[in-house]
Image: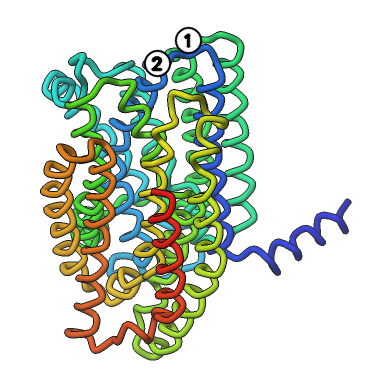
Amino acid sequence: MPFAKQANKLLLKKYIDNTAGLQAFQLIRFGTLLLISIVFTKSNLSTGAIGDYEIFLFVASLLCSFWINGLIQAFLPLFRNNKTFQKNEGKSPEIFNVFVFISLLSLLTIIALLVFKDLLSKTLSATDTIPYFNLLLVYIFLSSPSFLIEYIYLLKNRPGWILRYGFITFSLQFILISALAVFGGSMELCIKGLVVVSGIRFIWLLLLIKKYASPRFSLPFIKEHIHFAYPLVISTLLGSSAHYVDGFLVLNKYDAATFAVFRYGAKEFPLVLLMANALSTAMIPEFSGKEKFAAALASLKSKSARLMHLLFPVSILFLLFSSWLYPRVFNANFTESAVIFNIYLLLIISRLVFPQAILTGLKKTKIVMYASLAELIVNISLSVLFIHFWGIEGIAFATLIAYAVQKIIWIAYLKLKCGVLPGKYIPVTLLTVYSFLTLAVFYYIY
């Protein structure tokens, strides 16, 4: 047994680094959500009930994801490298402070939700109600701080534990919620199962805080964190607003069933989204120092090329077969979702270009924010226009164009203001060839 355990550690160390661990964790997360969605469509739950579940998750993500992501991105470079705490190898006061800060913001979000419940309900839902509102409050409190877990393991260089945590908790989530749905449970019961799993994750986080964090609250560190985080929070809010604008438009124009159809299609290919985001996040610290900047550019270009060789062929295969897969994997009510999904597959062209990693590493956060604002303006304008011509498909096309505009602004800024040529970090020829092939296949299918 000791030999087997040691061999397992050596294999993890050799083949799974922090980036790969985080990529695998994100794949497990989205894979679980996808499998649960499939189980729902095969169960006796109605399309409207599934729509209520999607609205529940949509509201939670709408209210919390932008500031959680922004705070965590800002926290990563501040860990062991800030003006408040001196470097040490013991328990981290930084981890304790970010936990307290995120927990406090979770409570403030809940209070805001209670105060503006009626306004938000009328804005989001044709029935003027947010499904399972009381459960939503508990879910936000438990789930928001729990997003820290995988990043604590990342900072402590524990990729194996990232995988263990993901496998254990998401397996439990899938088994519990799927069992409730398959054996005739209501959607309310399924969401209660989701809240229970969130509670388990929260307990896991408290154990990590006890193990790795030093309980030394510091207002100066919180201020330093806010100073560095607020542009990233705003840019994340603006950058992700395309997703929420899409949801707002569909909810206000169509019913819950149509919203479910749209949501089942309006999903980026998880393999692309998650592996690209993990690479971008992992590369940010590499661009914080001038001495390794050129090497970091070359590394980003090389890693981008490897992702392209993997992800473009897989995306093209899904373009070819999604119309056949959707009604079989889900059911006939979700046939139109395949068209939306195909449009979102085209986001791979912009997704596998990583100027944002360089800009964040250089602390050029204002241009990150301004480009995100431009994306939002383009998305709103085109979505309102396109929905009248192409319905929910038009909304997807607007998102595609808006995201491309954002990346173009970042690339142009790096070239004109920082002197970083696109060819230094983008495999241009490879991207051009794969993009042409992908667009040609999409045109043929569409």
Q: Amino acid at mark 1?
A: Ser
Left or right, residue 372 beside residue 55:
left
Residue 71 placement (x, y as % from top left): 30, 53
Say if 176 sits above or below 229 in the image: above
Residue 336 placement (x, y as % from top left): 39, 33
The residue sitting at 81% across, 55% down in the picture is: 5
User: Which quarter of the picture shows residue 295?
Assistant: bottom left
Q: Nearer the viewer, residue 184 or 70?
A: 184
The residue sitting at 86% across, 55% down in the picture is: 4
The residue sitting at 44% across, 20% down in the picture is: 191
Say if 248 sits above or below 26 in the image: above
- The answer to whether the residues at label 1 and label 2 have Cβ atoms under 8 Å apart is yes
Q: Amino acid at mark 2?
A: Ala
Q: Nearer the viewer, residue 21 or 442?
A: 442
Residue 94, visible in the rendered structure:
no
Say if 35 sits above or below 370 in the image: above
CA distance for labels 1 and 2: 9 Å
Which element carries disc 2, helix, strand or loop?
Answer: helix
Residue 241 placement (x, y as % from top left): 22, 46
Badge 1: residue crowd in 10 Å (few <14, some 14–19, many ≥20): some
Query: Residue 186 — which label?
Result: 1
Residue labelled with disc 2: 49
Query: Residue 46 — which label?
Result: none
Q: Nearer the viewer, residue 333 or 150?
A: 333
Residue 391 placement (x, y as % from top left): 23, 36
The residue sitting at 48% across, 47% down in the picture is: 149
Which element carries disc 1, helix, strand or loop?
Answer: loop
Left or right, residue 99 beside residue 329:
left
